[in-house]
Image: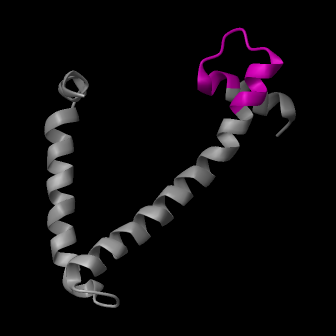
Amino acid sequence: MSLGDVVSRSSSFFGFTDSNERLLRLAKIMMAMMPLLVATFALVSTFHIIFIAEVLGGGPGQYIEGLALVSILLVLQLALMTLLDYPTGSLGDHIG
């Protein structure tokens, strides 16, 4: 894969029709950082859920007891997100 292939793929991915070098450089940086951001968010959210489970479970090391409450909270969060944002997000935009 040559540099030209990467440039054309990144410009077509971001929808650039007249792409100059600054836009392509920004697109390449964004494409390189996106997996790092996703992995970081997944790691942080995992430890955040464990922390909440420990607090709800009664203290350090007792996260198993709090996992049932955390699962209820997650189901409520997903249901609320579905009601407010699916399919267009217009209700959530109107409220917030």
List x then y, in percent, for residue 15.
60, 18
- Indicate yes or no whether the magenta region holds residue 49: no
| Prevailing SS of the magenta stretch | helix
Q: Quadrant of residue 67?
A: bottom left
- Residue at image coords 84%, 28%: 4
Looking at the image, which residue is at 53% across and 52% down? Answer: 38
Determine whether 5 is above or below 50 in the image. Answer: above
| Quadrant in the picture for the C terminus | top left
Q: Is residue 54 left or right of residue 95?
A: right
Q: Is residue 20 rendered magenta in the image?
A: yes
Residue plotted at (60% across, 24% down): 14
Q: Quadrant of residue 87?
A: top left
- Percent x, y of residue 70: 21, 70
Q: What number of labels is visible?
A: 0
> Is 58 drawn above or below residue 82 in the view shown?
below
Is residue 86 in view from this perspective? no
Q: Is residue 28 left or right of residue 43?
A: right
Q: Is residue 87 placed above or below 22 in the rendered structure? A: below
54 lies left or right of 2: left
The part of the chain drawn in magenta is 11-27
Q: Position of residue 74 (x, y in %)?
A: 21, 60
On screen, 84 above or below 80? above
Q: Position of residue 39 (x, y in %)?
A: 55, 59
